[in-house]
Amino acid sequence: MKTIVNIMKIIPFQRCGLMVALFLAVQSPAWAHAFLDHAQPQVGSTVTNSPTEVKIWFTQELEPAFSSIEVKNAQGKEVDKKDVHVDAKDKSLLIVSLPPLPAGKFTVAWHVVSVDTHRTQGHFEFTIK
Amino acid sequence: MKKIDSAFAVLKKQRRLLAVSGAAIVAAGFGTTTVQAHGFIGDRFFPPTIATDDPFATDELLLPSVSYLKSDGVATTDFGFEFDKEIFPKFAVGVSGDYLYQKPDGQSSVSGWDDFSLSAKYQLWENVPHEAIFSVGAEWDIGGSGSTEVGADSANVFTPTIYFGKGFGDLPDTLKYARPFALTGTLGEELPTSYADPNSLDWGIALEYSLPYLQSEVKNIGLPAPFKHMIPLVEFAMTTPENRGGGPTTGTINPGILYENNYFQIGAEAIIPVNSATGSQVGAIVQVQIYIDDLLPKLFGHPIFGK
């Protein structure tokens, strides 16, 4: 433990903090790639009623023309209404509508481009009981 | 002094391998071209690891990296940097250096630059559905470019290396909570030009469990910030001498954690020597990775030639 304590004294964490602070000070909040922050239905969740929409909130604002969501059933058939759009007020929120769905497991696949042109993708599942 | 040299050699190697990653592959300018962000294979984000190099050939900036290791009464603190630039698509070259501060107990300190290194790396193969990548590269430690006071070698050392990465997002549903695991590794042959130094096999592995991957791909378990941005990992960075009386395998085991956000990564690891030939006390390393493609996207994040 003594060594660890000595290490903590020696390593100049303050320098790291200063670097980060300087970096953030000159950083436009619009830059960077978009990660999934949270979704509705939640990632990996089980819901009792068929949701009317899939909503995904990202960590960055999106380019609508290059951002998409596909919802597929267990047979791989796309079941969403193909009306994916970025929310008018919240540019980091991507939405696609759903028809009434039967019980089963569904896969949500998303591909987005953030406003600085970075492309990211991902997928998750939810279950209707 | 041999023990100290061994321990420091491992530390130095780790610093050199600190893969930095800033960066991504942004197409030039802000036209309609879209680009993959740095360190991604499909859904998987491979963070830049600390003690072992990652398999990505991208624009990267590591600044600063600060590590500390004490062995046999000599404390060595290493202030390092590395910068890599993508020249052609998936081919990058880099330069790295370390300023060393060595303080023996009860004696005055010495400090100076260690030998500088040049490197090149090419991403040879990728498999998106299986989150896999394989790269090849080489590093040249420029003999005589550092200060002899801190033990910089006068001989050149060439290290051809292979790199790999594998995410486990393709595991079946029954193992879904293992999907956030990923493995990266390196295997390099150290070839010194001096017959006084042994050839050595450098090998390293990083095993990580991505909490962001768990939250966004497997199940939202309600982790609050900052935990949902963290990636716990353990790294193994080893060197096995092969001839010329090079001694036993030396290396360290580094458990630690990475914190990610959109603009930078901060990582911290303990440095645990695997044997007495490596060192006798636990050290530590702290590293900041700046995503320079996000900071200066018109300058970085894309190759100089080609798209």
Image (cartoon, coloured by chain):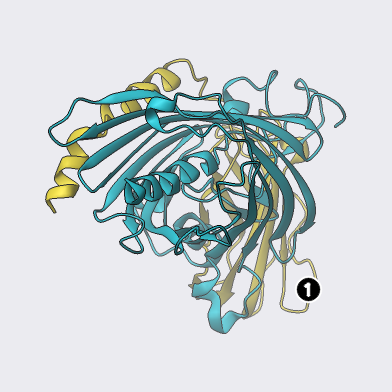
Chain colours: A yellow, B cyan
Q: Is residue B271 visible?
A: yes
Outermost residue to the top: A26
For residue A98, above or below residue B103: below
The residue closer to the viewer here, A115 or B66, is: B66
Total number of numbered discs in the rendering? 1
For residue A43, above or below residue B95: below
Element under disc 1 = loop
Residue B171 at what x, y percent from top left?
62, 76
Residue B101 at what x, y percent from top left?
31, 28
The chain to which mark 1 is attached is A
Residue B290 at what x, y percent from top left?
51, 30
Query: Which residue is the site of mark 1?
Result: A76
The residue closer to the viewer here, B259 or A30, is: B259
Classify the position of the N terminus of chain B by image quarter: top left
| Residue B272 placement, left or right of B211 | left
The residue closer to the viewer here, B180 or A80, is: B180
For residue A92, above or below residue B172: above
Which image quadrant is residue A77 in? bottom right
Outermost residue to the bottom: B174
Q: Which residue is drawn at 40% across and 65% down?
A: B221
Q: Residue at x 71, y 66 (%)?
A: B130
Q: Can residue B83 be seen in this view?
A: no
Classify the position of the C terminus of chain B by image quarter: top right
Q: Is the residue marked by circle 1 packed among few (<14), some (14-19), or many (20+) residues within 10 Å?
A: few
| Residue A127 placement, left or right of A111 | left
